[in-house]
Amino acid sequence: MKHNFGAGPCILPQEVFKQAAGAVLDFNGLSILEVSHRHKDFVAVMDEAIDLVKKALNVPDGYSVAFVQGGATLGFTIAALNMMRDTKKAAYINTGTWASGAIKEAKKVGVDCQVIASSEDKNFSYIPKNFDIPTDVDYLHFTSNNTIYGTQFKEFPKSTLPLVCDMSSDIFSKEINVADFDLIYAGAQKNLGPAGATLYIVKDSALGKSTSPFMPTYLDLKQHVEKESMLNTPPVFSVYVALLNLRDLIANGGVKAMEAKNNAKAALLYDEIDANPLFNGTVAKEDRSNMNVTFTLTNESLQSSFDDAWKAAGIVGLPGHRSTGGYRASMYNALPIESVQVLVDVMKEFARKNG
């Protein structure tokens, strides 16, 4: 058995893999890979996927859900264009690589980005707090979870401004209040499904209000909502697997139950990192991500031996991001706590032999 701690695309439940594999061979007499997106059977898939997103996250009335392509990277631009209003200014919180990317792309389409808080001064090892939020900007943007450096907002910013969030790496991992946001977007490939689809949850009153002189049809969320995620050929397989995964999530207690499981997995691994003299956590304890646990060896000369140990246990995907080094254990929804225990046992045994 392999224990997949890779940062994404994500691990999914084995039952979802089996169902998806079956549909590749026979979805409705045709493969899901060849069925027309206009066929009633796939229209039903899209409709149910949208409905289950709303059910799983308790999306209130007055919000729409859309599946779009382009990943959250295109979402940086879509968010900026769709939320641009009279001031053409926006507040951004910079907590890492993807937040920095959102700022860069917003500037390219004419948004005056005001970075009101940043953790860059300490290599993005904490979540900024106690910062002032301006009132003379169009929206406030932040990234809920930092996949590369391993930090996570435990409390979301509170503001009268429209709130925009990239939730790519922790959506569906914990309960949220969608009504606090004007726009949420998330690449599918962490807790929702395979790469290819990007989820948007948008307040209806925010649609069609952009003041941007530049608005390609494909980047206009109003167009996607009105066309029911069928503005062009959607990522059929990604949406179908997302549907299967959402069914599985809801059948197993929903987001509330998943949050409890994720808390238990994170506690198990962080407790070992803190107790084990051979390992150090890399971020502020109060801001540690439940999704992406980053750590280093206290003695780098042991790296080769430790790598051999975790690989021998069937663990994959443990090296840190190429920009940071060290180790990163990504623990998305479908990773069982038994896999986390295998990693903890490897760390304990490694300390016994080398401590």
Image (cartoon, helix red, strand yellow):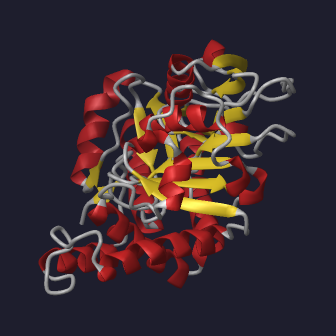
Q: In which quadrant will I find the N terminus?
A: bottom left
Q: Quadrant of residue 232?
A: bottom left
Question: Across the whole image, how many numbered discs are drawn on residues?
Answer: 0
Q: Where 216 sits versus 168, above or below? A: above
Q: Which residue sits at x=64%, y=67%?
A: 57
Q: Residue at x 22, y 71 (%)?
A: 36
Q: Is 38 situated left or right of 347 in this image? A: left
Is any atom of residue 279 visible in this view? no
Residue 137 image offset from top left, x and y in percent: 78, 25
> Which of the 4 quarters of the picture holds residue 141?
top right
- Is the residue 111 above or below the residue 3 in the image? above
**138 or 309, nearer to the observer:** 138
Q: Residue at x 34, y 36 (%)?
A: 319
Left or right of 159? Residue 29 is left
Front residue of this view, candidates 87 and 278: 87
- Residue drawn at (46%, 59%), measured in percent from left and top? 191
Residue 202 visible, this orientation: yes
**Residue 347 x, y percent position in the rendering:** 42, 47
Q: Quadrant of the C terminus?
A: top left
Q: Position of residue 328 (x, y in %)?
A: 43, 39
| Residue 81 screen position, x and y as percent | 57, 32
Say which quarter of the image contains residue 203. bottom right
Q: Is residue 56 above or below residue 29?
A: above
User: Relative to 61, is 277 above or below?
Assistant: above
Left of 298 or right of it: where is 167?
Answer: right
- The residue sitting at the front extreme is 213
